[in-house]
Image (tube, helix red, strand yellow):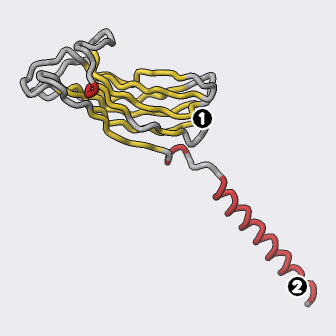
Amino acid sequence: MRNVNRRTRIRSVVLACALALVVSQGAVAPASAATIKSSFILTTTTERIPDGRATANVSVQWTSAFSFRVNSLVTDHCASSGAGDGENAQLDAVMRLADGSTKTVRINADNNGCQLFAPKVPNTWVLVARSASSRILNVQFVLSEKNADGGYADSISAGEVAKSLIIRNPLR
């Protein structure tokens, strides 16, 4: 009889330890990268006539401390007059790295001109941004209206640039 009680107590202790281990692992294990996503829409504003505007639908998924995946749809919209404003829509990512530096990467751009009435094929890209040298602490996305050489067709105004919130890397 005494032997059976001892075995039962040992089993109970082993099961309690195993349960405690499983619970503690769930509490301290990092979330899987598949669930660490952010999605948002950026839009520039129309500051003057005949300015158009730009929009970007962005989804970010952190894949490691050194990389993230971006799925984006960038669109250059014509002004209501139907005339182009001489600018395209460009989405950049500004990464702040653990070594204190920043790195800017062009994510996507709509360089196809704008069309007011004709349907346009959207410009969708999936890009993985990486830093080989340092961990990525956070990223901020910047949508801007620029001309083909990367400058501004007219003097830049506040409405021609839209910035996302800073997105912290939870895997850093």
Q: Label 1 to label 2, Cα distance in Å? A: 51 Å
- Of 5 and 171, nearer the camera is 171
For the point 43% across and 43% down, the residue is: 38
Q: Is 45 located above or below residue 101 in the figure?
A: below
Residue 127 place in picture, x, y as percent: 43, 28
Q: Which residue is mark 2?
A: 4
State left or right for residue 108 relative to residue 31: left
For the point 47% across and 33% down, the residue is: 69
Residue 152 place in picture, x, y as percent: 28, 14
For the point 26% across and 28% down, the residue is: 159
Residue 98 appears in which quarter of the rendering? top right
Task: Count numbered badges in the picture.
Answer: 2
Residue 54 appears in which quarter of the rendering? top left
Q: Is 165 located above or below residue 153 in the figure?
A: below
State left or right for residue 159 relative to residue 68: left
Residue 11 place in picture, x, y as percent: 81, 75
Please state which amino acid type lies under the numbered disc 1: Ala
Please state which amino acid type lies under the numbered disc 2: Val
- Of 134 and 112, nearer the camera is 134
- Of 114 and 128, nearer the camera is 114
Marks 1,2: beta carbons within 8 A? no
Q: Which residue is mark 1?
A: 65
Q: Secondary structure at mark 2?
A: helix
Residue 100 appears in which quarter of the rendering? top right
- Of 31 and 99, nearer the camera is 99
Seen as rendered, the residue at the extreme bottom is 1
